[in-house]
Amino acid sequence: MSIAVTVAYAPAPRQVREVSLTLPAGSTVQDAIAASGLRAQFPEIDLAPGSVGVWGRKAPLDQPLRARDRVEIWRPLGVDPKLARRERFGRQGARTAGLFAKRRPGGKPGY
């Protein structure tokens, strides 16, 4: 018996490479990545813990796959999301960002 899985990797923003595979039942995440050939195309792929997932959830390399699973290989973040938000807020200022940025004409402050 065999299972159909997809392996996805985004080498750059808005560029996704997907490889559809048919693997034997009982194959693991690592087997799918090896069969996809993506590591040969993109040698910068790092399979450190936390850089691979199945359907958006972290998965160990030895996790068995089920039919129609989507294995995702994630790039490391370029910038810390909290830092990016702080910088964006600093550029925009308090009046143009956040919950009270848009007010009805003639409305009370905060509504």
Image: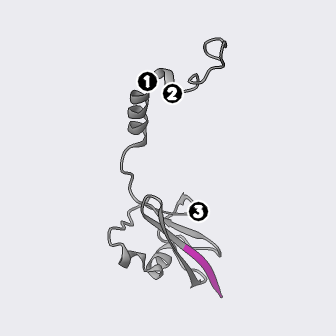
Membership of 21 in magenta stretch: no
Viewport quadrant of the N terminus: bottom right
Q: Secondary structure at mark 3?
A: loop
Viewport quadrant of the C terminus: top right
Residue sitting at 37 percent across and 77 percent down?
41
Where is residue 25 shown, x and y percent of the image?
A: 61, 83
Q: Secondary structure at mark 2?
A: loop
Where is residue 91 shown, x and y percent of the image?
A: 39, 29
Q: Residue furthest front?
A: 105
Instruction: State whether residue 89 is above or below residue 30.
Output: above
The disc label shown at residue 97, or none: 2
Task: Please name the residue that numbered disc 1 is placed on.
Answer: 93
Disc 2 marks which amino acid? Answer: Ala
Between marks 2 and 3 in the image, the one whose residue lies nearer the viewer: 2
Residue 70: quadrant of the picture: bottom right
Task: Please name the residue that numbered disc 3 is placed on.
Answer: 55
Residue stretch rendered in magenta on the structure = 1-6
Q: Earlier in the sequence, mark 2 or mark 3?
A: 3
- Which residue is more in the foreground, 91 or 3? 91
Mark 1 vs 2: CB contact within 8 A: yes
Residue 75: quadrant of the picture: bottom left
